[in-house]
Amino acid sequence: MRLVVPVSGSDPKTRLSTVLSPDERRDFTEAMLADVVDAVTSAGHEPEVISTAPLDCAVPVTVDDRGLDPLVNDLLASTVTDDEGALAVVMADLPLVTRESIERLLAPEADVVLAPGLGGGTNAFICRHPEFRVDYHGASIRDHRETARDVGASVTEVDSRRLATDIDEPGDLAEVLLHSDGAAADWLKQSGFELTATGGRVDVERFR
Ligand SMILES: Nc1nc2c(ncn2[C@@H]2O[C@H](COP(=O)(O)OP(=O)(O)OP(=O)(O)O)[C@@H](O)[C@H]2O)c(=O)[nH]1
Ligand SMILES: C[C@H](OP(=O)(O)O)C(=O)O
């Protein structure tokens, strides 16, 4: 199955601007991407990384400056042309993913398999239906369920905390330090981030 990892390589992760400089946001993006590429590779698949700008990565990176919707919809149109074609899209900001969570995503045989993100996004999907298209941002999981239904596709959802945890905001960084020992967690530790527990709530603080 064709498996694509789209990445924003130009000014990525703007919602982390309060805690990371522009260079750090790019470096952290590369670290999260490394975790995703590792998980996909160890699940026996060859990820195609498509980034808006060049990035360091263990596998080749195709540079394509299109936004997510035109990019992914074009991939769908060219890959899922009949009952045989299948496309998987896994976002690059999922540093908690493991071989097992990728295998769980790839196991169902439905026309459309959706992995919802915390906050309403669509962190990963598989499509085997020629008419399904994406419309990201906002509560995209709701839109994708509806689109799949409208085109008559069978739909399954994968209930996985690791696939659901996309790292968008400073508060999400605690999840990386709590549940991962991959490249993104290493990068955060080397950059001075540590877990803190105040008032019964776990958070991160930067000590240098
Ligand atoms: N190829 C490509 N990937 C994108 C684009 N926009 C976002 N992505 C990737 O899609 C996933 C979800 O992105 P978002 O969290 O919505 O955007 P982001 O740029 O990472 O972060 P923000 O600037 O904080 O919204 C991440 O893996 C991004 O790297 C784009 O225009 N093109
Ligand atoms: C791309 C977008 O990501 P989010 O903004 O939810 O992280 C979505 O999944 O719709």
Image (cartoon, rainbow, N blue to C red):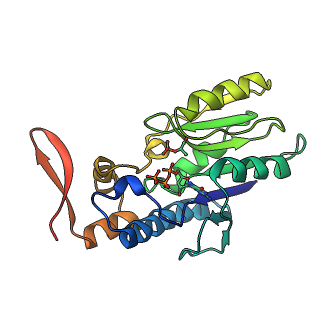
Residue 12 x/y as whole percent:
47, 61
Q: Is residue 107 placed above or below 193 in the rendered structure?
A: above
Residue drawn at x 20%, y 49% as measured from the top left: 203
> How far from the left and from the top, in percent, is residue 18?
28, 57
Q: Is residue 180 left or right of residue 117?
A: left
Q: Residue 5: horizontal and vertical position, in percent?
A: 62, 58
In the image as oriented, which residue stretches furthest toward the left?
Answer: 199
Residue 185 location, x and y as percent?
34, 63
Question: Image point 43% across, 45% down: which residue?
Answer: 165
- In this view, the residue in front, 146 or 158, is 146
Quarter of the picture containing the C terminus is bottom left
Work out whether residue 44 or residue 141 is closer to the camera in this orientation and state it. 141
Q: Is residue 182 visible?
A: no
- Residue 49 in sight here: yes
Q: Residue at x 43, y 37 (%)?
A: 118
Q: Quadrant of residue 195?
A: bottom left
Direction from residue 105 to residue 178 in the image, left or right: left
The tally of labels here is 0
Q: Is residue 56 above or below residue 50?
A: below
Foreground: 58 or 28?
A: 28
